[in-house]
Image (cartoon, rainbow, N blue to C red):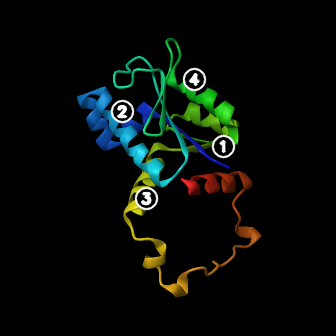
Amino acid sequence: MPLHVIIDGYNFIRQHEGLSALERQALEFGRQALVERLAEYRRTKRHKITLVFDGSQKYFFPDANTSWKGVGIKFSRHGETADALIKKMALREKEKAVVVSNDRDIGRFAEAQGATVLASGKFEEKLRMAEMMGQEMPASESEPEQYRGKPTKKKGPAKKLPKKARRAQKKTGKL
């Protein structure tokens, strides 16, 4: 099942130290830097990514709905918030969606629709891990032969997470 990563743009930018510093210089600098990072991430992981912003200040991207280096970018329309747009997307995508936001209202709604919700800080960790994976040696050169293909120790049913938590863990593991 392909994942659709839906990111609350300004929420993510303001949670990230480097991006928020760029945003303080100019709003479009923060947005552009985030899109560049996500494009790099998309080269490593082939998930569909949509970045959602409030549409009142869209200087860098001329259209309300556009794509830049494989990253979908949506701006809310006049009278609509980015939160409402994210909720519509979560409603449409259901289990396929991974919503990245620290907004509790969005999180509760998305989880009720079956989507997985990931805090901005956790997704930042996933971005960093993907960046490091892109720079490392291939697994065949970095792992000794004796460790490849060995099964891990099985966990018994007593140690299993609840089904909802296992599904969320499985989806976030793909990020």
The CA span between labels 2 and 3 is: 21 Å
Compare residues 48 and 117 and report the one nearer the observer. 48
The percent coordinates of residue 32 (x first, y second) are: 34, 34
Compare residues 129 and 110 and report the one nearer the observer. 129
**Relative side of 19 to 53, left or right:** left
* Residue at 64% across, 56% down: 170
Asked whether the residues under the numbered discs 4 and 3 touch, taking CB atoms below 8 Å apart as contact, a structural biologist would say no
- Report the amino acid beneath label 4: Ala
* Residue at 40% across, 55% down: 128
* Residue at 61% across, 46% down: 3
The CA span between labels 4 and 3 is: 30 Å
Q: Which mark is residue 31?
A: 2
Asked whether the residues under the numbered discs 1 and 3 touch, taking CB atoms below 8 Å apart as contact, a structural biologist would say no
Q: Which residue is mark 1?
A: 96
Q: Which picture quadrant has residue 166?
A: bottom right
The percent coordinates of residue 151 (x first, y second) are: 64, 79
Q: Which picture quadrant has residue 85?
A: top right
What is the secondary structure assignment of the residue under circle 3?
helix
Precedes in sequence: disc 4 or disc 1 = 4
**Relative side of 101 to 23, left or right:** right
- Report the amino acid beneath label 2: Arg
What is the secondary structure assignment of the residue under circle 1?
helix
Precedes in sequence: disc 2 or disc 1 = 2
Q: Which residue is mark 4?
A: 84
The percent coordinates of residue 69 (x first, y second) are: 42, 39
- Report the amino acid beneath label 3: Met
Q: Which residue is mark 3?
A: 129
**Relative side of 37 to 146, left or right:** left
